[in-house]
Amino acid sequence: MKRRLVSVLIGMTMAAALLGGCGGSSNTATDEAADDTAAEAEAEGEEAASGDLITVGYAQVGHESDWRTANTENYQNTFTAENGYELSFVDADNDNAAQIEAVRSFIQQELDYIVIAPIETAGWDTVLQEAEDAGIPVIIADREIDATNFDAFVGTNTVDEGVTAGNWLGEYLDGAEANILVIEGSVGASATLGRTEGFNSVVAEHSEWNIIDSQSGDFTQSGGQEVMESFIKSYEGQFNVVVCQNDNEAYGAMDAMDAAGITYGVDGDVIIISFDATHDGLQYTLDGKINCDVECNPIQAEVVAGVIQAMEAGEDYPESTIVEDSAFVAPGIESAYAITMTQEILDGRAY
Ligand code: AHR
């Protein structure tokens, strides 16, 4: 298997154009490689349990957010029998131990490839070593990990997402004071750690900004609402910015502020920054309720399939592919860091 030690930055439109034909049935080099593999197996008298299909295990984080649902659907629509794959999908329900066990079961089943969207950054060395010992290539997707014994990474740059949020806030406030509450994502997740690191690096440049408090909302709507309710109890009247590390948390935070009679968005007292830019998040942005929504693109399965196809063909493949993100702001806001929302953008947002 060949490896190219470079990072590739890819926009999803470009990814679709480049990799849309990467399914087993539409790539000549891949078809030839798959045929060779099947012929060898036959010659050795081995039983090809799933015919010519490439078996892929996907250990998914869970179903905590709209982003996650879109990401799951993207995998299920990409790794199909029609495209030459048999997908084993496990929803780990945000349970780190269950996710590691899912990977172990993929190893026991001797699947051809393992894809992991890791819940937490820590704790992966041992099971990844087991996969390596079994000769099964592993692709880490969506979130990063501390371990380095895997074959390829496909995901977004969450530190950059946090920096974009901070830069946009600096531009919007133009020197005005910020008293900030942060609803973080799940503890130990790279999406949480990266966005926090990126945003805080911009906060450090602004002596007129103060982070009042920061608590985990676990990337869920109920978590966002619960944290915001407790923030309101402790800090009502003291904050003018709420940063929610995903859209679902923002929906919960807005519900809590509605119940408390606190106004937010472009015409309100509190600026809301969110992450993900899923369809409903962008609807709120278009409506002026969310001021700025920084994208985290969940459509990554085609890129992962492209890496697998390159591995199958014994070709060079990117060790790290960073899926590019944009950011979106409410109508009436002009920004050097974000695109002003329109109905047309919303209509084109499928997830
Ligand atoms: O890892 C990506 C993050 O996980 C998304 O921001 C969030 O919505 C999801 O649950």
Image (cartoon, helix red, strand yellow):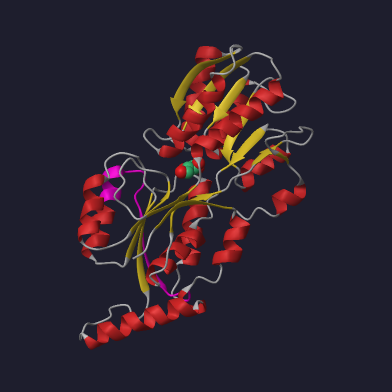
Q: Residue furthest right?
A: 332
Q: Quadrant of the N terminus?
A: bottom left
Q: Quadrant of residue 79?
A: bottom left
Image spot of residue 121 (x, y percent): 35, 40
Q: How many marks?
A: 0
The magenta segment is 82-100
Residue 254 can be seen, yes or no? no
Image spot of residue 173 (x, y percent): 69, 20
The residue at the point 60 percent across, 33 percent down is 164
The residue at the point 43 percent across, 75 percent down is 84
- Height in image: 288 above or below 341? above
Image spot of residue 303 (x, y percent): 50, 59
Residue 24 can be seen, yes or no? yes
Q: Out of 240 and 137, give the one closest to the viewer.
A: 137
- Height in image: 105 above or below 208? below
Was residue 90 drawn as part of the magenta stretch in this picture?
A: yes
Image spot of residue 216 (x, y percent): 43, 29
Q: Out of 274 and 54, give the one closest to the viewer.
A: 54
- Height in image: 107 above or below 210? below
Q: Out of 259 and 246, give the one closest to the viewer.
A: 246
The residue at the point 20 percent across, 85 percent down is 44
Was residue 328 drawn as part of the magenta stretch in this picture?
A: no
